[in-house]
Image: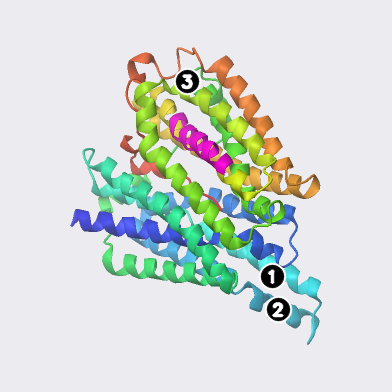
Amino acid sequence: MQNKRLFSIFGIVFIDLLGFGLILPLLPYYADEYGATPAVVGLLTASYAAAQLIGAPLLGRLSDRYGRRPVLLVSIFGTMAGFLLLGLAEPLGTVLAQAISGTTSSIMLTNAIIIAILFMSRIIDGLTGGNISVAQAYITDITDEQNRARGLGLIGAAFGLGFILGPAIGGILSNWGYAAPAFLAAGLATINLITVYLYLPESLTLEQRASLASRERPRFSLGTLWNALNRPGVGPLLHVRFFFGLAFATFQTIFPLFALYRLNLNAQETGFVLAYVGILVALVQGVGIGKLTSRFREVNLIFASAIIMTISLLAWAFTPNLIVLLIVLMPLSFAGGTLNTVLNSTLTKSVASEEVGGTLGLSASLESLTRVIAPSMGGFLLGALGTWAPGVASVILMIWATLFTKRRILGNPDIAPQTQQDEPANISTMDLTPKKVENHELPQP
């Protein structure tokens, strides 16, 4: 029974991420077709992240109070509705424009309404798209400490597989119009909805719900952040997490715009490139991290990866063609995958065991903020200065992160003490209770 539920959750997360990956490379092309500027496309991407920043913790709290199953059903329905709205943006926008202005309407008005519908679709999906944290909590409910890592590892595998296949399939479907991937994503969400309704039982008893609902939960606030940043072990790592996160999120969220305006790639080509990046990151996190952390101290890996990331982002900013881009993406993916994993691993080794969940939640909240700031900033810079500007801005951020790492992290005795440092980094083995995973962040388009 437990294995059946674990693989049901795997299927739910995989289909969810596959649908998300279908849309990832297409949104800038979709919006550009209706006259959206790079700055508007950046805001469109940021709207999803901002809505998710509000919705994900709320879904976690609701799942504690009312159960995992009903919250999964509601959240998946919201995702389905968001994708349907995305696919129907053009006909709905045309009808609304005609209703407002009469039998005929201007192209400018029609395009403005279509873009507004695109914003609405992403906000709806963002508010309800935090169900991965609920899926993690479900796994935590049905596993013990011995097999929890395996269960959470299935979610990681679903993430990777969804992000490898999704952009490639979405790119191919774009040959039949940008609405086609949205309708397929809506269809996948419908399959998810039926699967949960028919095959996934509730994981919490009434007594467990009452207990979880009465718990005091850590809140993300400026005071909490300030206190964490002033701690000698945690503060420097969170500082680097924020600046690296802002630089890397700028690359991730602006890349489709960069591909469109700098390299003139179509949606299919961009989808294949993103699938290539997904394979590289999966290799780094699935194979490379274990070998690296068994040979090198994690703080040294942070410093070396920050240097590689800085150089790679500079090369990305001035990439002249697709061949050079594919070469540049190899070290960039290696550095990004390493930093994402090792920073969190080092954080958990720099605090007491009872602080791990709260510290990871704070790290995830900071990363969520970067995904609100980065696309807005990157879209504005690309539109105002040129395709090179987001990359150069990311380089400046990483130069600061690299110098800060050298000054405040290397040799800092409060960061990952040597007695713990010899343990291999493995984020999936952390003790993640429902309380601790509720702020987990999803990847953003």
How busy is the neighbourhood of tag 2: few (under 14 within 10 Å), some, or many (20 plus)? some
Residue that numbered label 2 is attached to: 94
Which one is earlier in the sequence, the residue at label 1 or at label 3?
1
Amino acid type, mark 1: Ile
What stretch of residues is rendered in magenta?
327-343
The reply to whether the C-beta atoms of the residues labelled 1 and 3 are less than 8 Å apart is: no
Q: Where 123 sits versus 146, above or below?
A: below
Secondary structure found at label 1: helix
User: Which is nearer the eye, 437 or 26?
Assistant: 26
Q: Which mark is residue 300?
A: 3
Q: Is residue 266 above or below residue 152?
A: below
Which of the marked residues, 2 or 3, is nearer the chain's N terminus? 2
Numbered disc 3: secondary structure: helix
Q: Position of residue 439 (x, y in %)?
A: 46, 43
**In this rendering, position of residue 336 left or right of residue 193:** right
Q: Position of 357 compared to 154: left or right?
A: right
Q: Indicate whether residue 340 is drawn in magenta.
A: yes
The residue that disc 1 covers is 114
Q: CA distance from mark 2 to mark 3?
A: 56 Å
The quarter of the displayed image where residue 99 is located? bottom right
Q: Which mark is residue 194?
A: none
Structural distance between the alpha carbons of marks 1 and 3: 49 Å
Q: Residue 267 location, x and y as percent? A: 60, 61
Looking at the rendered structure, the kind of residue marked 2 is Thr
Identify the residue at horizontal 37%, vertical 40% (top origin). Answer: 286
